[in-house]
Image (spheres, helix red, strand yellow):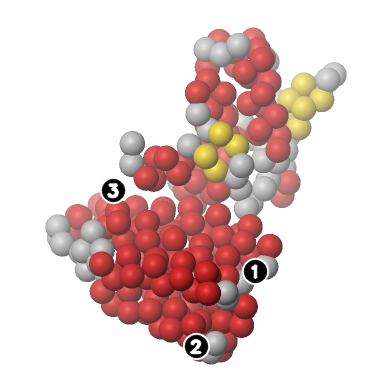
Amino acid sequence: MTSQDKARNHRAGYAIRGVQGRVIEGVGRAIVGGRYRPGEPLPREAELIEEYGVSRTSLREAMKVLAAKGLIEMRQKSGTRVRPEAAWNVFDSDLFRWSVEEGRGEAVISDLLELRLLLEPAAARMAAGRATMSDASRIGTAHAGMAEATADYERYAAQDVAFHMAVFAASHNVFLQRFSSLVADFLRLSFDMQQRAQLEQTSTVDFAEDAVRHGAVFDSITSGDSEGAARAMAEVVLDGKRNLIAATESLKYDL
């Protein structure tokens, strides 16, 4: 199992595995993909039990998870219905992944990139003023790992995610730290798409320039340069956006 597969097994605080995970994944994707539309009832319990081969207890536990994600509403007399999209938890990593995998990710990715440009430079700015020695060590370790893995997609991606998570942690803002889990999943997905596009063109990769840009963020944070950290992080996010757009276009033409 790859690191990405392991990450997919636990998102947004819920275990996505076993028989319950099968229901969560199947019904969740069906809702996001439009098989079950907002306002419509889900199939009866007996039908879902037969479709997914689970017990009534497992099905009901899975339904509770989907309800917590904002996807469904369970009522005793009227059954279980799909909630309006406006009620869905947009910060839930599973919903983000399902949207992309079901071909509805373009708008979500665009909105998330805009949000990253608002929040990540702010997190870097805060980190420059609040980072402890331990925080700086975590960021530096992640950056060193990036610099050592510039020709290895999987290793570089893991260290890149660790870098951004460490910057969010160093902001010491609980809401930014909560947002970091979604950014981590976004980065994993972005690297996966870029890897697929890159391998269509060449078998070699080089993230040396990207590592340098992340290094500018690290240097600004450790020197206490709040505005420099914000500017450097904005450039990192913008460069990631450019690379993701290029990868997306490449994969479209390949279809």
**Residue pointed to by mark 3:** 255
Q: Position of residue 97 (x, y in %)?
A: 49, 46
Q: Earlier in the sequence, mark 3 or mark 1?
A: 1
> Which residue carries the number 2 mark?
223
The residue lying toward the viewer, choosing from 237 and 142, is 142
Mark 2 falls on what kind of element? loop
**Residue neighbourhood size for the residue with mark 2, other residues' Cα within 10 Å, grouped as few (<14), some (14–19), many (≥20):** few
**Pointers 3 and 2 in contact (CB under 8 A)?**
no
Label tally: 3
Mark 3 Cα within 10 Å, few/some/many (few <14, many 20+)?
few
Q: Mark 3 to mark 1: distance in Å? A: 43 Å
Up-down: is 61 above or below 143? Answer: above
Residue 131 percent coordinates (x, y): 57, 76
Nearer-N-terminus badge (2/1): 1
Residue sitting at 55 percent across and 55 percent down?
181
Spot the residue most to the front.
133
Read off the residue under disc 1.
172
- The amino acid on which the numbered mark 2 sits, given as a three-letter code, is Ser
Residue lying at the far left of the rendered structure: 203
Q: Horizontal and vertical percent for residue 38?
A: 69, 37
